[in-house]
Every structure is written in structure tokens, then in C-alpha cells.
Amino acid sequence: SGSDYYLNFKGLCLEKLSIYDEAAELYKKALDSKPNNINYLMNLGLCLLLFNKPADALKIFNKALEIDPSNIVIYQYKGNCLEQLKRYDEALKCYNKSIGAD
């Protein structure tokens, strides 16, 4: 129907206003209709990361990597999550993958 597209953009606007909880809910609704959409997954993961929920964000980025394992941007975000969780060795591996130095 295309409503997922508009839910995603409304989420982006809310995220820019630092209204992360509402933005995350809209991304989840967009994902209900397109659960494998990489952009929606990345937006949700980044929103959760900004909302200081790195463990939740990590789950989302792991799902995104299952769908698109060669996406270096996802590895960067996953590294950010792991760093916030003080899992530095794992974070370093993700950062290396994000720059093609694995």
C-alpha cells in the first residue's frame, strides 16, 4: 500500500526531533509490512542506538546482516553497539569489516 514508506519517513522526522521512542514504533510498523527492508532495519537500529538501547539495536543490526552480509555500514553500526556494550574486541572486528580490513 505504500504506507510503510510514509511511516519510515515520519519516523525519520521524529528521530531528528529526538523523539526516539515514537520513531522506533513507526519503524517497527513499517517493518510489519516489509520485515526484510534493509533501510527500515537500519533506521530502527540507529534509532535504538541513539535512544541508548545498544543491546536492542545490536539485535536489529544482526538481523540486517543476515539479509545483507556485505553491507559495511551495518558493520559500523554494529561496532558502535558493541563498543557501547563494552565488548571492545567484537567492536574492533566489526570496524575492521566496515573498512574491509578483516
Image (spheres, helix red, strand yellow):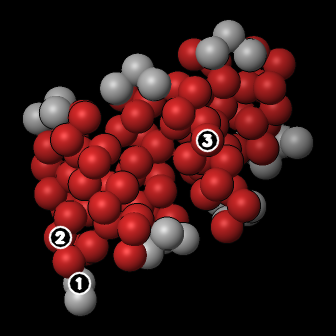
In the rendered image, which quarter is residue 99 located in?
top right
At a point 75% along the width and 15% down the height, the residue shown is 88
- Give the mark nearer the N terminus: 1 vs 3: 1
Q: Where residue 27 sits: x, y (%)? A: 32, 55
Q: Are marks 1 and 2 in contact (CB under 8 Å)?
A: yes
Q: For the N terminus, which image quadrant?
A: bottom left
Q: Which mark, by number, is residue 6?
A: 2
Distance CA(mark 1)–CA(mark 3): 26 Å
From the viewer's perspective, tell me whether residue 49 is left or right of residue 8. Answer: right
Q: Which residue is mark 1?
A: 2
- 5 to 9, vertically: above or below: below
Q: Circle 2: is it few (<14), some (14-19), or many (20+) Cα within 10 Å?
A: few
Q: Residues within 10 Å of mark 1 (few under 14, many from 20)?
A: few
Q: CA distance from mark 1 to mark 2?
A: 7 Å
Question: Where residue 87 sits in the image (x, y, percent)?
Answer: 74, 16
Q: State the residue at coordinates (31%, 44%).
A: 24
Secondary structure of residue under mark 3: helix
Instruction: Tell me which label, 2 or 3, sits earlier in the chain.
Output: 2
Q: Is residue 99 above or below residue 85?
A: below
Residue holding disc 3 = 59
Task: Tell me the SS state at disc 1.
Answer: loop
Secondary structure at badge 2 equals: helix
Q: Amino acid at mark 1?
A: Gly
Q: Residue furthest right?
A: 102
Q: Amino acid at mark 2?
A: Tyr
